Amino acid sequence: MRDFCMKRKRMLFVTIGVTILLLSGMILYSFLLGDDPHRYYTGLGESISLSFDDSKLTFSYYENGKESIYMANPDGTNVQKITNPTNLQHRSPKFSPSGDKIVYLSEDQEGIQSLRTITLNKSKDRELTDEELHVKDAIFSRDGDNIYFVAVEAEEFKKGENSKEGFDLFSIETAGGQITKLTDADHFSMNHLFLSPDGKTIYYNEVDGEKERIYAYSIEDKTRTTEPSFLPKEFANTYSFYEAELSLEEKHLAFTDVSQESQSFFEYELYILDLASNKIEKLTNFRKAVTSIEFFHKGKKVAFLESTNWPKEPDKFTLKTIDLVTQKLETIQLDAPKTAHSIRLIHLIDQTINGFTIACLYILLVILLSIFFQHYHTSKVYLPSIISFSIAVIIFMSSIAVAVTINPWYGIGIGMLAGAIFGCSIVAIIFIFIYKRIVK
């Protein structure tokens, strides 16, 4: 009997030790690698662009976690890699009107995005902004001589919620040179640029507290308005115009919005507004999310991306087109690189190390310690659970202090950790309560 007790005690010690090592290793692994859902991802990025003659499509594409700019035919054939970043991520490509240049964003390891262009026939790459600005979006002017972009000072961007500055509209010559600041409004969420057909007005999106609105900036008058001339007022106050895109002849406005059927799930569908009849029609019913809308310049057709696993990360996008007359949907298969076999095993290991497995190991550790005390120090059987509850309370109090003194979002994150530990403690104490009675 004594030998059995010794073996059981030794087994408990070994199991507790292994659990502590696994739990510590997983937590350390998570901290060291950070929270990058695209770490081993292979697939489409979140933006596409069509050339003005509809002969080429450019897009960003992840290959084992590295995002580069690619180009292909609109039917998905003849895929070519255009940029080869090293310690950078290249994304958000846009064609010039002539189709011989692409403007795109280059993100460094600190998350700062700079503006770059590449001349396709010469493979000549040029950096237009440095690390002093964080660029969010960019497009060519109608004549291709200038690039309009949204940016904020990089240092202010790093401050996050504590920043007192916001995003503004800028311009720069395509060949490089002096940057001109067009607005001084410090927008909180300025994004998604598009032009009027005559190229005299720049449109962009901003959340006004309730809905995503379309704002207009006149290049000639240098004035900004919250009421774009093409948009009927009755719709401006009814719909949120996410990812809005105006057709070249200014007859249709395509956009995404949360469908009425899925307000609580935030599922974004594709809509089209006929600016002649002032009628809005929902074109998709994916119950997922639609992004990056592009009108074909010839014919009534739209290309876009569907996030097939919304709202999970990383987004897995599928390229689709829809005929505006027949409403026929077509999925475009890109002849693009696939995930390397050597990466798949690493990715599988990485997927197993997540919040759920860490929580399970934490619960197991509390339970094992409680079982140990049940057999060898019965009066202290609930001590591990009490300590766990105490840790949750301490972390929760810390989250309030962090939210008040440093950053509300950091406080929320720490508060969620406290809630998770509290939940784990409840599961553990219920288990040991039942176990104690079974042993008796």
Image: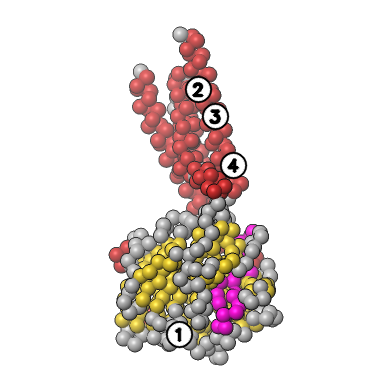
Q: Report the Cα–Cα distance between label 4 and label 1.
A: 52 Å
Residue placed furthest toward the left: 261
Tell me which segment is drawn in magenta: 93-114
> Residue at (49%, 27%) from the top-left corner?
369
Q: Where residue 12 is drawn, which disc sits there?
A: 2
Residue 398 in the image: state x and y as whole percent: 54, 46
The reply to whether the C-beta atoms of the residues labelled 1 and 2 are less than 8 Å apart is: no
| Circle 4: element type | helix
The residue mark sitting in front, 4 or 1, is: 1
Instruction: Indicate which disc, 1 or 2, sits on the residue closer to the N terminus.
Output: 2
Instruction: Indicate which disc, 4 or 1, sits on the residue closer to the N terminus.
Output: 4
The reply to whether the C-beta atoms of the residues labelled 1 and 3 are less than 8 Å apart is: no
Q: What residue is pinned by disc 1?
A: 248
Q: Report the Cα–Cα distance between label 4 and label 3.
A: 15 Å
Q: What residue is pinned by disc 4?
A: 28
Q: Quadrant of residue 22?
A: top right
> Residue at (51%, 81%) from the top-left corner?
52
Q: Is residue 145 visible?
A: yes
